[in-house]
Image: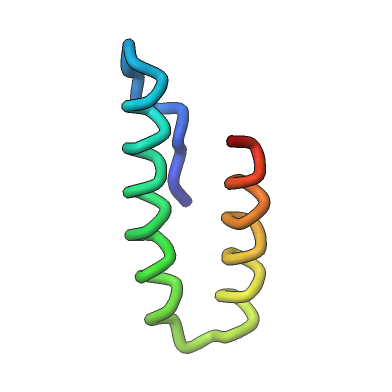
């Protein structure tokens, strides 16, 4: 589980950019999982997180 609030940046745009990069890497890892149910649940959570931008 990634914690997006652990990293502190002075520039809010840098925070958004860094978080998106982390999310993309996380999504790639999810696609490698063999358990489809787990992948669907985690992906849904990540997608909801993006709506806060």
Residue furthest top in the image: 10
For the image shown, how many numbered marks are present on the structure? 0
Residue 6 occupies quadrant: top left
Residue 19 occupies quadrant: top left
Q: Looking at the image, which residue is at 46% across and 28% down? A: 5
Whether 21 is drawn above or below 38: the answer is: above
Observer-nearest of 47 and 3? 47
Colour scheme: rainbow
Tell me the quarter of the image containing the C terminus: top right
Relative side of 39 to 28, left or right:
right
Whether 34 is drawn above or below 14: the answer is: below
Relative side of 47 to 4, left or right:
right
Q: Looking at the image, which residue is at 38% across and 25% down? A: 13
Whether 34 is drawn above or below 19: the answer is: below
Whether 37 is drawn above or below 17: the answer is: below
Q: Looking at the image, which residue is at 66% across and 63% down? A: 44
User: Residue 35's spot in the image, x, y percent?
Assistant: 54, 85
Q: Looking at the image, which residue is at 40% across and 46% down? A: 20
User: Residue 23's spot in the image, x, y percent?
Assistant: 42, 53
Observer-nearest of 50 and 40? 50
């Amino acid at each position: 589980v990634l914690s997006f609030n652990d990293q502190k940046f002075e520039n809010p745009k840098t925070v958004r950019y860094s978080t998106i990069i982390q999310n993309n890497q996380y999504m790639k890892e999810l696609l490698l999982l063999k358990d489809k149910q787990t992948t669907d649940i985690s992906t849904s959570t990540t997608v909801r997180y993006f709506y806060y931008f």
